[in-house]
Image (cartoon, helix red, strand yellow):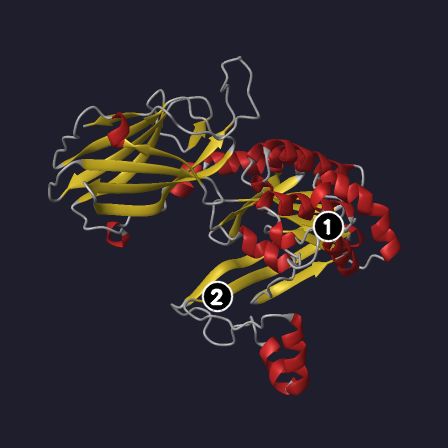
Amino acid sequence: MLHNEFDIAVKVSNLGKAYRIGVAEKKEKNLITILLNAIIAPIKNFRKIKSLNRLHTDTEGKDVFWANRNISFTVKQGEVLGIIGKNGAGKSTLLKMLSRITEPTEGEIELFGRVASLLEVGTGFNPELTGKENIFLNGTILGLTKKEIEERYNSIVEFSGIEKFIETPVKRYSSGMKVRLAFAVAAHLEPEILIIDEVLAVGDIEFQKKCLGKMQEVAGKEGRTVLFVSHDMAAVKKLCNRAILLQQGNIVYEGSATDTVDYYLQNAASIASQKTIDISNAKGNKKFVITNIEMLNEEGNKVQLAESGKDLHLKMYYEVKEKGPDPVVIVKIKNNLEQILFTCLSRNSYNGIMQLNDKGVITCVIPKLPLATGLYSVDITLKYWFDITFDVENIFSFEVERGDFFGTGKINSDVMNGMIIYHNWIIN
């Protein structure tokens, strides 16, 4: 896409970030230590900083992992760019490079304007300072004067909704409180470029709505540039002008937000199918294992995109290499923050002891799927009595879209994640 050079806010050219697996990068604990070391040994530290994130040796070796590579795109001033993709696609690494938290291994980034980032809970906050002190600290970092910060202070505190705790040290804040304050600060201190990762998922539904409304205001009325990472495809469609889809660190699709999201969802099954189940990496004694997984809708069709409010069938192909007492299957469903939302346990709903063949299928049926829009992953554990035979985290992932959860004939946008009380099991 061609742009006038004077209306560009972000320009990324052939960007790449590589990590050497198994090599820990030494970091100083605080700014004072870094400055003292720089004074004591300036030449040594200059060389260290220069080569900190640049791999001057073989970048194609077996111990080198490329989190991003060959990333190129341009964002106009006032444009909202969505960045989507599955967990591990390289979205957060890209944002960290754009925020200058980490340096790229190759390529260039050009940013035209002040940048504010909201990447992780509490990023940019000093835990020992109060909420009020952190507001002024962040404002100063962005180049605002004390008067400019004071003019925005009341709006920031009111939006955050934590007036009672604004004089309390941030280290005593809950994750939700930190997110509220961090977003309020980032949105109200008027940076030209606002970079937001999936941290809003930590907040409650009411606050998420409030944040999305503020982002629309920031991008629409105020004309600031926003880079937005989210697993909420509806929010990406609503907020973003354009979007890019990342897969294995590369851009595989770029276009309008609607086209990019549709491409992602339509191809989610083929993207997910590239991950095969490797039994050798599973924990346990391997006497009873899962060899393959399929997800079916209530009509029995194989899908990768589940619909909120409709039955979901998780079909697991098993193999018994050695029989044991009281076989049990445990399925855990987690959100993108790795929080376990609910657990399905075969012992709770299956009448009697499971009788297994040498090979067969175990299906966990979750009626009226009570999950909000987003990306979810599955952990599976198999046991004989108390002995674990098979245990794999993030063995499978799936997307949930909005549905008629409450049976009103309308698509619902505010389905709350909840506990599964009833679930059925089919043993073949």
Using the numbered discs, state the Cα–Cα distance from disc 1 to disc 2 in whole angstroms: 40 Å
Above or below, 172 relative to 21: above
Query: Can the viewer see residue 73 in this picture?
Result: no
**Residue receiving disc 2:** 19
Q: Residue at x 64, y 76 (%)?
A: 34
Q: Please, what is the three-letter code of the amino acid marked with disc 2?
A: Tyr
Q: Quadrant of residue 339?
A: top left
Q: Position of residue 317 (x, y in %)?
A: 23, 36
Q: Is residue 135 left or right of residue 65?
A: right
Helix, strand or loop under label 2: strand
Residue 109 point in image, percent of width and height: 66, 61
Residue 325 picture quarter: top left
Labels 1 and 2: the sequence-earlier one:
2
- Please state the horizontal and vertical placement of residue 233, each as a whole percent of the image: 56, 35
Residue 12: percent from the left, percent from the top? 65, 57
Q: Is residue 38 left or right of residue 348?
A: right
Which disc number belongs to residue 167? Answer: 1
